[in-house]
Amino acid sequence: MIDLHCHILPRIDDGARDLKTAFKMASIAVRDGIDTVVATPHILDVPLEMRKLRENVRKLNRLLVSRGIDVTLIPGAEVSPFAFAQINKIEDYTVNGSRYLLVEFPCLNIPEYFEDLLFNLLAKGMVPVLAHPERNSKIIENPSRIKNFLKNNVLIQITSGSITGLLGSKIKKCAEYMLENNLVDVVASDAHSARRRPPVLSEAYGRIKKRFGRDMAVALFYKNPKAIIQDKELIK
């Protein structure tokens, strides 16, 4: 499986606090059946340089190889909508240098300018991937609101813990609505640690496979994230 959203880089954001934690997270991912992880540190009001983040990914990959941990890290980022005004070249923050940009969907309110932000990204030839909208309080109240943002190839990534119930029953219900209405393109862990929020996908994969079929499960955990990493079109 491919984990498209993971805060595994140590000492960058609220994810892995040190190298030891990063190693543990990588080991957990391997045991869970994940062979590729996109490192997606938060890009907030003071943007981190993507050049430095890529170098951190290269260093961590070398350390993982030296320890025999068989997982490959790919550079990416989770860009907050509040950071866009501070970023000169937003295309630098895409997943693996592709056209796909992981955009954080706020968990509370939806910014008034959010639709304009997505339109501007699309106008630049980029494809926004909305991270965990099922956890937004306004979307939870009315899940059909998410359809307002799904225009011109905007994609949705939901969190594996939302499907398993780890993040609560209301979020689980919202995630199920999106799955039932075929609105989801990718499932990822959004892992931040080795304990409370680890990089695991297999339980969510099993639940989706059982309820919605193998084809959907393979698309959400394998085919679609692979297409994003390789900068290819998703087949819907």
Image (spheres, rainbow, N blue to C red):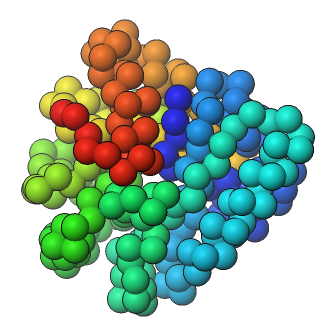
Please say whether residue 86 is visible from this viewpoint: yes
| Coordinates of residue 55 in the picture (x, y in percent) | 70, 68
Residue at the image position 62 percent from the left and 24 percent from the top: 33
**Please, is residue 147 above or below residue 162 in the view?**
below
In front: 161, or 6? Answer: 6
Q: Is residue 148 left or right of residue 130?
A: left
Total numbered circles: 0
| Coordinates of residue 160 in the picture (x, y in percent) | 47, 35
| Coordinates of residue 211 in the picture (x, y in percent) | 31, 13
In front: 215, or 107? Answer: 215
Residue at the image position 66 percent from the left and 43 percent from the top: 72
**Please, is residue 86 above or below residue 190 in the view?**
below
Q: Is residue 142 left or right of residue 191?
A: left
Please say whether residue 177 is visible from this viewpoint: no
Quadrant of the frame with the C terminus: top left
Q: Quadrant of residue 87?
A: bottom left
| Coordinates of residue 204 in the picture (x, y in percent) | 47, 25
Residue at the image position 20 percent from the left and 26 percent from the top: 180
Residue at the image position 58 percent from the left and 52 percent from the top: 74
